[in-house]
Amino acid sequence: MQMMNKVFGGTVHKKSVREDGVFSITLDNTCSLFRGLQKEELVLLTHGDSVDKVADGFKVVAQSGNIIAGIANESKKLYGAQFHPEVSLTVNGKMILKNFLYDIAGCSGTFTVENRELQCIQDIKEKVGSSKVLVLLSGGVDSTVCTALLNRALNRDQVIAVHIDNGFMRKRESQSVEEALKKLGIQVKVVNAAHSFYNGTTTLPISDEDRTPRKRISKTLNMTTSPEEKRKIIGDTFVKIANEVIGEMNLKPEEVFLAQGTLRPDLIESASHVASGKAEVIKTHHNDTELIRKLREEGKVIEPLKDFHKDEVRVLGRELGLPEELVSRHPFPGPGLAIRVICAEEPYVCKDFPETNNILKIVADFSASVKKPHTLLQRVKACTTEEDQEKLMQITSLHSLNAFLLPIKTVGVQGDCRSYSYVCGISSKDAPHWESLMFLARLIPRMCHNINRVVYVFGPPVKEPPTDVTPTFLTTGVLSTLRQADFEAHNILRESGYAGKISQMPIILTPLHFDRDPLQKQPSCQRSVVIRTFITSDFMTGIAATPGNEVPEEVVLKMVAEIKKIPGISRVMYDLTSKPPGTTEWE
């Protein structure tokens, strides 16, 4: 939309207001693009720049407050939307795309999953010929569908299925993966490589003045705190183990293809040039590291699902005859629990920490704050609408809340770029009022761009928010604590019958010890757990489940109670954040 507007003589400006999240916009539903829609629609907006002067021949057909959200030149059949019609957070996005494809562009819907399945099989046959293929199987839907496609396209003796236990699997996961795959007739070789992963390293670029590319060896994985470095080490170690397996089987590496269940979102988020030449890295997926990219350039990687999204892979899995419990299984990332432990040596406290904390105090006690003028109050008012302020007044006069920064950072996606910044914690004197908390979780990152995630902290009000961290690395003790918390939470979700309503539920271990006496400088060995529910159809965007709505509150409270019994757990938190601004995983 911005490019179209500029090319035809309009202008685009970076405004002080940035929109990240779901907003209600007003539409001109006489415009062909929006035919059949309401005058007001909920859409996902993620942008920092906005159209200023509209190009000649174009008219404004959608607005978000006073920001232009859609332009059209009906005679030239040119349409621009500032929001994302392709994601499930835009409620009627499919109708917009349907209007465009069928009515405006004159397309017809004759291309089906069956067509794509035949195309995938044909591509595999042509690329592999009589060679062998090593496929890395996690037991998730993507890698299993990939293996089923390979078995459909090639002779069974050409496909070598390997499940690598990297030491970051869930409780009894590798065992159940092996059993499930055997039932499907897939013979899988299980490799226990936990030691290799814990001590794995990778090479990382050193940035220097004269631009000559130099490399350094990273720390070992069990001493690494950077999420990107963790992901790169894990991805590279997978390739090294795969090469060892090829060697043990007396095969020549140059004659073996490596197959992966890589999806479109993996490539987009890793900023792979296969998906885009200009994308920002949100996070490096373990199946798109430099080693994989090098193999891809050599034509040695088979990725039959690289143009598919998760929902399409599930449809394809059903077409291939895979059982429903496997097809609808919650995704579990390749790096596993390694990216669900927030590793840290030092607290993350930058110079903006005190000011942001003060803004959060004003927001959490807005009804009292408006009575005493403060320069930061004006900042809050400047980036909220009258409607927002009214809702804040209502919430804060009814509920006793406090909001504060936590001294850790997590990965998010803001304005289509990767962010790596603060988490805001909210606690309350009363029982949590979830609708109000969800409203605050949408509002806070919009006001404070250095916050990409908002959590509710269960238990009594947090009087002294933690300002320090419990030193945390990927050690076996830390991993076993998280493994137990993950096991308890998923057991309760399964037993409740609500597992199908939630798309994914990462359980995260954070290096935070609440309720410590700040004057006692004793080292801590306590940590806190986060429950991250996520509801999505496309895995590119999504929302947190609201307790009492998409998931019963008693199910969440039961998880909290069971996790609290695990030794070394200080508090339990609930992630309230949509994607954007918070990614599904915390790293």
Image: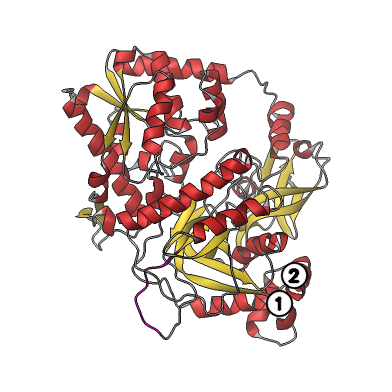
Dominant SS of magenta comes to: loop
Left or right, residue 58 beside residue 46:
right
Q: Give the percent coordinates (x, y) of residue 103.
A: 74, 28
Q: CA distance from mark 2 to mark 1?
A: 9 Å
In the rendered image, the vertical position of residue 35 relative to residue 107, given as above or below: below
Query: Within the magenta stretch, is there residue 280?
Result: no
Residue 77 visible in the displayed image: no
Determine which of the numbered discs, if any, sits on residue 381 in the image: none
Where is residue 395, by image quadrant?
bottom right
Q: Give the percent coordinates (x, y) of residue 406.
A: 49, 70
Question: Which residue type does callout 2 highlight?
Answer: Ile
Q: Give the percent coordinates (x, y) of residue 137.
A: 37, 31
The one of 43 and 163 positioned closer to us in this rendering: 163
Give the residue number, with chain letter if any, for mark 2: 395
Whichever of callouts 2 and 1 sits on the residue coming sooner in the sequence is 1
Where is residue 85, by image quadrant?
top right
Helix, strand or loop at label 1? It is helix
Which residue appears at 67% of the width and 54% of the height?
Answer: 553
Give the residue number, with chain letter if any, for mark 1: 366
Left or right, residue 216 beside residue 67:
left
Query: Which stretch is magenta?
Result: 520-527
Q: How many marks?
A: 2
Which residue appears at 52% of the width and 39% of the height?
Answer: 330
Left or right, residue 272 beside residue 451:
left
Question: Which residue type does callout 1 highlight?
Answer: Phe
